[in-house]
Amino acid sequence: MILNQFEITQEIQNLNLENIHKEVFCYSYDIRNIKTLIRNNVDESSESYMAAYSSFKGEVYENIIYEHLLRYAQNNDEITRFVLKGPHQNADHRYKKNGLLINKSAQIVYKSVYKDISEFDALFFTKEALYFVEMSTSKKTVSLIKRLDKKYALLKILFPSMQIKSLIVLTEGSLGIKKFPSFCTVWLTKELDNEILLKNIIFKKTKYKKIDPPTAKKFIETSVIKYKQFVYFQTLEWILKNTRFKDSSNINLNFFKSRVLGLYFDIFTKLYIGFISTKDFKTVFSDFKLEAKDDRVLVTIEKINTKIYDIVYYVKEKNNKLKRIYIKNMNEVTIKDKEIDGFTNTEVKYLMKYVFNDTHSLSIENIKNIQSLENGVSFVKIK
């Protein structure tokens, strides 16, 4: 499972600060919350303190590892290009609307219409591969492992001719190491327990002027990277269009089995296939009481987990709240609120305003045809 192309150094493993002390202080940190808690003498064992301190410590850990990776890349001939961020990044390239760029927090992100689709702690290239780096101080790795599929899929679409791999940097004692995908290299470092460093950063007791970015040609800005564009909402619309047979309301399930759709499922989680009326939806879910906007209940095929895909419904209420309704069977129906500023709400708003028309209407027969398939709907998963 674990690749051997890159091996951790003693300096990285021990979180040695000797050559990077100045640089670590030159990053921007969100210290407002933790500083307030400390000044108010909040109990360090309280949930609020531990959450704030853990988040801050994760920021510092990420920057320590990134600084070490800069030096690692400089001394490793296999690494051909390394993407700059943070205090090393040219600020003139920030605040763009679309593409692979540096966001307002000086992080590497892929953005579409101002929304961050995915963030990468670091990116670097070899001749054959693109590595994305993820760093975490959390001992629990379940959520991190889940996020990898989306990052992998997005980069595979952006760089279709390259191998996509990942470098995962965790602290000793992290759980689930053997569960990482085969494209991952896992490094383990010591715990970040340098309290003096952390408190100095919080209260800015050590100050440095801005640093000069590395000048070697392999260190690059996001603006010079060439890649295939991925346009979020237009892709959703293209998928919706291709779910139908020509001049028919029947769903083309073979389209969902194509190789590229496996990647799109990892990015979007759910793909919209149309909508049904409130009246028809009540024949599926008799206890339905919500008032759906435009009398439309949106229908998706959703990735429930790594193996199961199923039909899931979304209802935009007349009061603009959005509900997710999953009918596993009539005895097991889950209804969840979706965040008003989340991706799903944005997707639904876009589709209902600019895309959906009467040709996207589905019948109960369409739904039954999908649900009647033996063992549900099976899709190709590419890795």
Image (spheres, rainbow, N blue to C red):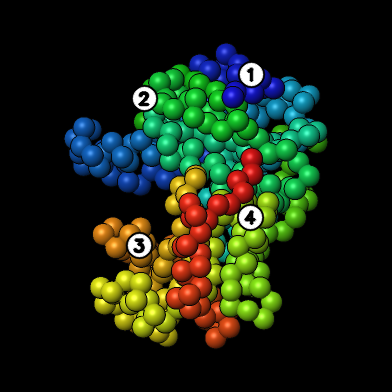
Examine the rendered structure and indicate whether residue 372 appears above or below residue 82: below
Q: Which mark is residue 7?
A: 1
Examine the rendered structure and indicate whether residue 238 appears above or below residue 257: below
Q: Total number of numbered labels?
A: 4
Separation of residues labelled 4 and 1 (CA atoms): 38 Å
Give the residue pinned by disc 4.
257
Callout 2 touching callout 1 (CB < 8 Å): no
Percent across and percent down for residue 187 are: 55, 23
Q: Residue at x 74, y 23 (%)?
A: 76
| The C terminus lies in quadrant | top right
Asked whether 39 or 355 is in front, the reply is 355
Binning the other alpha carbons within 10 Å of mark 2 as few (below 14), some (14 to 19) or many (20 upward) gives few
Mark 2 residue element: helix
Give the residue pinned by disc 3.
327
Separation of residues labelled 2 and 1 (CA atoms): 28 Å
User: Callout 3, which amino acid?
Assistant: Ile
Q: Earlier in the sequence, mark 4 or mark 3?
A: 4
Give the residue pinned by disc 2.
195
